[in-house]
Image (cartoon, helix red, strand yellow):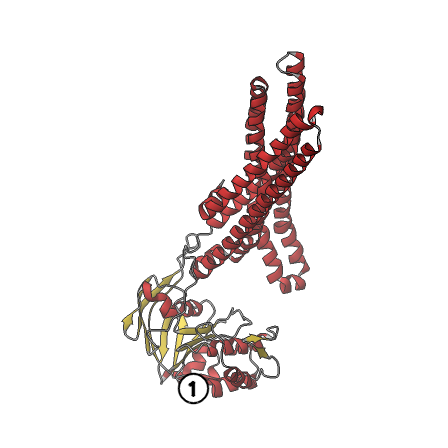
Amino acid sequence: MNLLIQLADKQGKSLILVILLSMASALLTVGVIAFIQYKLLNQQDLTSSVLWQFVTLLIVLLVTASVAQIALHKLGHQFVYKKRCQLIKKLINTDIEQVESIGSARLLASLSTDIRNVTFAFVHLPELIYGVVLCIIALCYLAFLSLPLFGVSILLLSLTGLFGFGLVSKITHHIKQVREYDDKLYQDYQSFIEGRKEISLNPGRAKRYFNDEFNQNAKHYRDQVTRADILNGFAGNMANTIVLALIGLNYYLALGLGWASFGVASSFALIILFMRTPLMSAVGSLPTLVTANISMQKLEALSLSQNESLIEQQEVSLPFEKLNLQQVVYQYRPDGDDKPFQVGPIDFSIKQGETVFIIGGNGSGKSTFANLLTGLYRPHSGQVFLNNQPVSLEKWHEYRLQFSAVFSDFYLFHQITDGHGDNVNDAEIDEWMTRLEMAHKVSHQAGHLSDTRYSQGQRKRLALLMAVMEKRGCILLDEWAADQDPKFRKTFYRELLPLLKERGVTIIAITHDDKYFDAADRVFKMDLGQLTELNTDDQSHAQDALSSIVF
């Protein structure tokens, strides 16, 4: 199985040690049975020393079995911990375009369901390993007692194993379907959570979505998991029945046909009965392991970055002075027969300390331009120049370090850090808390905000605080002022932007506030993916140009 292969690859030595401990535990278990058979059932040997030998053997068995189980649990959960950290590091290093193509619902399903399934597998893995090892050693002991009875036992168990393999294949098929519907259900959960306002206003829409989408996916999930559990239950009952049938068959062959003595037959029965519980546990753990194997395949299918190390922050070797985009083009994937939307070719330049406004209607390409400008999207053609030097793929990460941003769909973290992820001086935070009129609302301690649950406008102020504290050469603001009240909107354009300009910070703001166009050094308009600059003479007519845009 993929799970065991990866475990062996990552922690092979530890796994071998665990298997050896399990083998020792199984040998001791069989040794206890043999001791009972040859010592305790022999009345002539029943002395106090024999009893102490038996007690010592039991203690050694208990310690060995416990150490083996603890070692395997620690090994398994360490593997899950590393896998979880590995997955998050890969996600951090994956380009945003790939993350967007995967989708948040699928990612959340993998981060929760798949990691949980792998964890559950390691909870049951000791049962499988111990059961398999014990059965192998017990069968070897049975071969030592009677080869004819052993041959019949192996034949019957082999036929059962072939039938069981078919059951496991069917169980695997149903579990794969269960995992597929997991992704769909996570998408439904996301829809109900993110669309909670819309469905509250329209109960009919909620009912329609529930019946057409969620209920259907939930039914299919129920049906597939029910079939998998039924087959698993049948496999367990079959294994139990075969074990009992094997005991009866061995007694018949030994006593009825004279293949072995009564003592040997009794030993066979005792050992097979003792194998019964570990064997049942091993069979019962198979669906969990199959589920984990499927989850491992789902994790690998995410096609995340293979870089598993977090990028060490370093000093920017090219401080922001000038930025140029020359004939930059970004094209979205075509949707059916429709012509794909394209942004560009774009020619754009900006110098340190400039303030530039970008206007444009919904769907005009402003957000795509913002992602291109900040390096989140790589252009499909054209060239980006930083300080008159072309930005190569090797330097792309360093290029991104030139920017801080508050996007329209920003996320507000609790931590306040500079551009290196380090703490910021409290005096600087307090200064901007006061300027942003948030000092009376939120406090900070050890680089953490006391809360982030505020109105959208107030959250945007805190997001701007975060961007300023990073001390990057350029700050991009996407519709930042849209959620501010008129008084603070004026403060933003007339006080905060000039202050940042005075401190040498370059500002690129996507805005519709034509009233404050005079606060910008230049104004650009995005329309149908094309960026054009409104020159000084045209800026007096910018309000008319803006009013013609459909928002």
Residue 352 placement: quadrant: bottom left
Mark 1 surroundings: few (<14), some (14-19) or many (≥20) residues within 10 A: some
Near-viewer residue (441 or 373) = 441
In the rendered image, the residue lying farthest to the top is 257
- The amino acid on which the numbered mark 1 sits, given as a three-letter code, is Asp
How far across and down, in percent of the image, does residue 76 sit?
54, 48
Per the image, the residue denoted by label 1 is 518
Near-viewer residue (153 or 516) = 153
Residue 55 placement: quadrant: top right
Q: Residue at x 61, y 47 (%)?
A: 217
Residue 354 visible (yes or no): yes
Residue 323 placement: quadrant: bottom left
Query: Is the residue 300 above or below the residue 287 in the image?
Result: below
Query: Is the residue 110 above or below the residue 525 in the image?
Result: above
Near-viewer residue (384 or 514) = 384
Horizontal side of residue 259 vs 397, given as left or right: right
How far across and down, in percent of the image, does residue 399 sit?
36, 70
